[in-house]
Image (spheres, coloured by chain):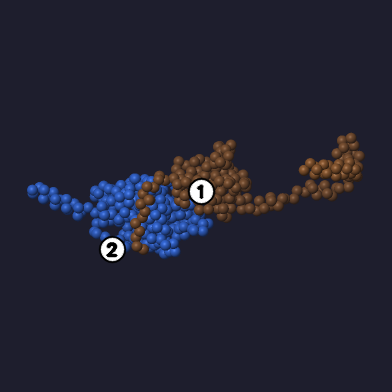
Chain colours: A brown, B blue
Amino acid sequence: MGILVTLSWLVLLPAICFAPPLPLRPSTGTGTNPVIPAASEPAVTESEPVEESDEEVRHPLAEKVLRATLPAAHTPAKHGQTDGPYLIAQRTIVEDYCGWGWVRKEDDTWRQARWIAIEPTVGVCPIPHTFLPRPEDDNNQQYRFYGDFAPYRAYEPQADMWVDVFILKGFLSLGPAEPIRRDPPAQASSRPNRFAERGANMLRP
Amino acid sequence: MRLLLAAGLLLLTSFQITASDIVLISGGPALRSFEKFRTASHDKYWGNFIDAAVSRAKELKSGLKPGDPIVWLVFRPSYLRRTEEDQQDYLKILEERGQIVGIAPIYFDNKDQLFALLRRDGSKDKPKISRLEYFGHSNKKCWMFDYSNRVDGGALEPLVLHVDDLDNISGSSFTSDAECVSYGCHSGEEFSQRWRMIVGRPMVGAVGKTDYSDGGIPKLSTGKGGSWAY
């Protein structure tokens, strides 16, 4: 091992010592030198007027064009009563699961969010996706929700769960957001079923 | 001795006079604005649970003892909302359909009202129930009078009858030989057994889904090996 290290030193040392000098930087690149005044470089500034004007035209980014044509862009930015306390809400569609999505307080994280079913206030504010062709068109859109939690809950029949109901009075659209990687509540809510173990008495079809 | 005989006769007469009620319950339809985007879309036709109850009433009428009335309980809020959506007066239509077979709807707006309507003491005003049948949305744990009508894909708490609510229905409201049937989906998988244990009367329910699409009395959905259980 020691011999190998010595040999490599013997080969590498002369290569470094007798290496040709590095090429110098071109002398035109003095724009960064504070000693030379900017006025002494007229040729550079005048030789690229076309390129500069090109930069000033702000072409729409492809991503922005795509976003503007998404159906969710057609939800109004603001609707209903949008004053007073609010919650941050994110539309999340879960296949075969009752509810609208998640809501949290402004300072909370999505881990502290609550899964809600949503009820519109008739004549004041409909559910945001009713402005769109299909309910899933605003999936992962974020809103500010104005309203109150209902004194009753909603029954989720697939998971046998009770979920909170939010009565929507107004909303403010905040645009698209990253999907929330969290499953809605799924544990059974009813009391332990001591009767189901008895099984059913089957009737002849 | 004479007094005893007279009392016995009186008791016998009163038993003959006391009638019992047959109760049919119709749950409400979903809103199309919620359901039309689903792959398994419910209630394209608003009157599934109305037509089923009316057909059943017609069937039962032929074998009724005189004085045994059919009490038809209808969950009103869902029909009002569907009326608004479709611009059709469904309450008027369902009343007309009931008239044809001689039954009139008694409306209820939440489960507490239903409990009150099912509370019987055997008096002339509140005769006991000899038969109860349910037509509406359900899963194995819950009758949902209001499915997908106020909230998308679910039902509001005061508008469902969950197995945990069955304590509010007393077995003494039923005659000793009362028969109960649920024509909702999956009732035979748990709801029936809980009903039998808590209310004390057997209830026949479906294992699997029920199908109202042919009109009239629902049948078990084909293809999934469903059956009736109690």
Q: In the picture shown, does residue A21 fall above or below A202?
A: above
Left or right? Give the position of A131 relative to A11: left
Q: In the picture shown, does residue B94 fall above or below A120?
A: below
Given contact means CB atoms under 8 Å apart, are the residues at marks 2 and 1 in contact? no
Chain at numbered mark 1? A
* SS class, disc 1: loop
Q: Is residue A146 visible?
A: no
Q: Position of residue A177 (x, y in %)?
A: 62, 46
Residue wearing tag 1: A99
Q: Position of residue B3 (x, y in %)?
A: 10, 47
Residue found at x 90% / y 39%: A39
Left or right? Give the position of A71 relative to A115: right
Q: Position of residue B57 (x, y in %)?
A: 32, 60
Residue found at x 25% / y 49%: B122
The foreground one among B225 and B100 is: B225
Q: Position of residue B138 (x, y in %)?
A: 41, 53
* SS class, disc 2: helix
Check the image and name the residue furthest to the top: A35
Q: Which mark is residue A70?
A: none
The foreground one among B143 and A112 is: A112
- The quadrant of the rendering that contains the C terminus of chain B is bottom left
Amino acid tagged 2:
Ser
Q: Which mark is residue B62?
A: 2
Left or right? Give the position of A42 relative to A140: right
Check the image and name the residue furthest to the left: B1
Residue found at x 26% / y 56%: B68
